[in-house]
Image (tube, rainbow, N blue to C red):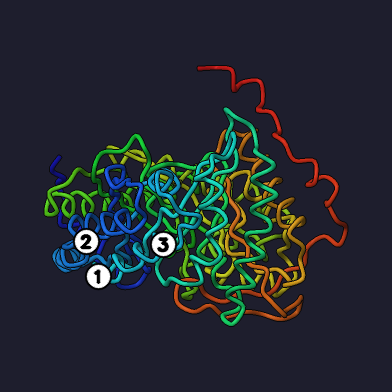
Amino acid sequence: MPISISNEEILETIQMVETENLDIRTITMGISLRDCCHSDLKVTCNKIYDKITKKAENLVKIGEEVSAKYGIPIINKRISVTPIAMVAESCQADSYVDIAKALDRAAKTTGVNFIGGFSALVQKGMTIGDEKLIRSIPESLAETEFVCSSVNVGSTKTGINMDAVRLMGQIIKDTAEITKEQDGIGCAKLVVFCNVPEDNPFMAGAFHGVGEPEVVLNVGVSGPGVVLSAVRKIPNAPFDQLAAQIKQTAFKVTRSGELVGREAAKRLGIPFGIVDLSLAPTPAIGDSVADILEAMGLEKCGTHGTTAALALLNDAVKKGGAMASSHVGGLSGAFIPVSEDAGMIRAVEAGALHLDKLEAMTCVCSVGLDMIAVPGNTSAQTIAAIIADEAAIGMINKKTTAVRIIPVPNKGVGESVVFGGLLGYAPIMPVNDFNSDQFIARGGRIPAPIHALNN
């Protein structure tokens, strides 16, 4: 579908790129690996490597060409694959670490930033292959550089698999411990979902869903700096006018993503999938979702009114973005990752933003508790309980929620951790001192809400 762009829009886009941090956060090629199953683990690894490197051999090159043509930075080029628990289950192997290493080699060969899909979908129960994959996560993330992992533990239709939640609490602890020399950075590549979308282009949660085509290109846009600039232009406007301003801005940002994504897909000779219109912040100054909320009139992100401000922002971004794209998918909204957002970091350091407030904010925005650093002595049961709370929010509200949490080994409240790059810097946040051990020990499944009986 051709998109007509006026000269005025071109000039606006140039300004957004040069002064307001506009970028395309990622183009992500989804690749089906369902035809790579084999009983021999080595054969499976070879088939996976060969298929990925063939399908994505030109992804980075074409991404750079399209970026140069339109003058819009494409920050990341990524790959997502069929959940590996499905692909690997036919292998006669006790561990899937070798498959993670094959994915890592493929990522290095193609030159992408990350590869997602070392994943399992266990919202209603775990197969043998699912459990093997989950237990392979800590070593896999320690032994690879580019591999990302995700596990879906609940959904509105099925409820919450509390056995999987309990296991993931321990897996996160194990991942932190095995990567302790890098401050537990393995946990930054691991996310636990409820209601996971199957076309998400953002890491660490991207995978290629079973209902997707053989190969597809999905796009994740960004633009907190652009929205911040728009909000600052009307500092005293009433909320309805503010929402309209954000919608108009989100339309322009998403339009850029649609244009770039379709051009890249055309050059790659594959279908264009979706635009994920999430506002994805970075640690750069002026590229912060928290700054947008403060520009609305909050002294500090986290004070009373923050959840209402985020609800307005998230809704306006979706309404404006949906009008600019033929296919919207993924997560689509506003991300609030603490370590990746300079404004969020400042709010935590000022004592304005706490874990409980972040949880409340996840009721109205995309994803959930994202890139949260907590003390290294936080128990596996407490982490599991944090996951359960987020999954419950997602299940009841029919939305995606997730937890990407890092129990930083040998560090506590008052200290900080530096991951670098887009992963940023995080103050260690306190967790509730009272334990949830007996609650988590129950296991079983939290039933789905009654509307799950609708087909």
Report x, y in % for residue 442.
80, 41
Quadrant of residue 191 within the rendered picture:
bottom right
Label 2 residue SS: helix
Mark with earlier residue (3, 1): 3
Residue that numbered label 3 is attached to: 100
Residue 81 left/right relative to 172: left
| Residue 125 vs residue 78, the one in the foreground | 125
Reading the chain from its start, which is encountered first: label 3 or label 2? Answer: 2
Q: Nearer the viewer, mark 3 or mark 2?
A: 3
Q: Residue at x 60, y 62 (%)?
A: 294
Whole-number angstrom distance, CA of label 3 to CA of label 1: 14 Å
Residue 93 seen in render: yes
Residue where numbered disc 2 is placed: 53
Q: Is residue 233 visible?
A: no
Q: Position of residue 73 (x, y in %)?
A: 27, 68
- Name the spot of residue 252 as percent of width and height, x first: 31, 51
Q: Which residue is mark 1?
A: 109
Q: Secondary structure at mark 1?
A: helix
Q: CA distance from mark 2 to mark 1?
A: 7 Å
Sooner in the amino-acid sequence: mark 2 or mark 1 = 2
Q: Amino acid at mark 1?
A: Thr
